[in-house]
Image (tube, rainbow, N blue to C red):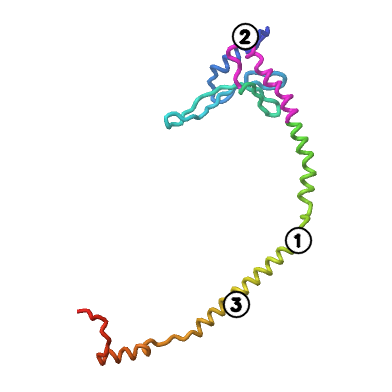
Amino acid sequence: MQFTVINQVDVGRHFNDLYLHFKGPDEKRIGYLYGFELFVRQQKIPYESNGMFQYESKNDLYAESPSGIKYLWNHGIPNTDNPKLAARYFLNAIDRVTSLREKYTKEHDEKLREIPVLKEMTQRTFDKETELADFKAELKRLEKQISEKITAKAETTETKEATVVTLDHSENLLPLRQMYMNQQLPDYGRLP
């Protein structure tokens, strides 16, 4: 749609009509403004209702820069109550370019200032490297000492177990057997 005489109310109504009634598969270019392409698009947004996922169609408007960055105003929703404000929708979206450029330029400059500091930190040697190496050597020595003590203790335990003489208990039971055979057993209250 081309406007020969610019009437804000007509332009605003047109943008509202596009926003409210666009039935696209995806998006549609609707014009150009200051080198930006103007689009209306329809997106399907999933939501859950009664345990089922359903999709809701949502339209929005945006301006796309030649570099491909998309700018929205008010989450892509024009002012449907006031056509004069709706007519300014794309101007407001494009107007965000300056503030966003300043914001990201500032962030970029801060990151660039941090790079030398971070490089220095990553290339710097650890101040306590020698102390750490000494602690590691001490740890190895202590581990070896503990291991040797455990091994020595295990060997002495094995030798003690090997020197224990097991007696044949049949020799201890021989006098009892003889008493039993001679029936000279003390009466412990025999069972009937």
Q: Which residues are magenta?
A: 76-103
Q: Amino acid at mark 2?
A: Asp
Instruction: Kindly identify the residue that appears in the image at 68 percent across and 19 percent down.
Output: 92
Q: Residues within 10 Å of mark 1 (few under 14, many from 20)?
A: few
Q: Which residue is mark 2?
A: 10
Q: CA distance from mark 2 to mark 3?
A: 98 Å
Say which element carries label 2: helix
Say which element carries label 3: helix
Which residue is nearer to you in this view: 159 or 1? 159
Q: Which residue is mark 3?
A: 152
Judge depth for marks 2 and 3 and give the one in front: 3
Location of residue 16 in the rendering, given as x and y in whole percent from the top left corner:
58, 14
Q: Amino acid at mark 3?
A: Ala
Location of residue 180 in the rendering, given as x and y in whole percent from the top left corner:
27, 89
Q: CA distance from mark 3 to mark 1?
A: 31 Å
Q: Is residue 118 above or below residue 152?
A: above
Q: Residues within 10 Å of mark 2 (few under 14, many from 20)?
A: some
Dominant SS type (magenta): helix
Which quadrant does the C terminus fall into? bottom left
Left or right: where 182 falls relative to 130: left
Q: Which residue is mark 1?
A: 131
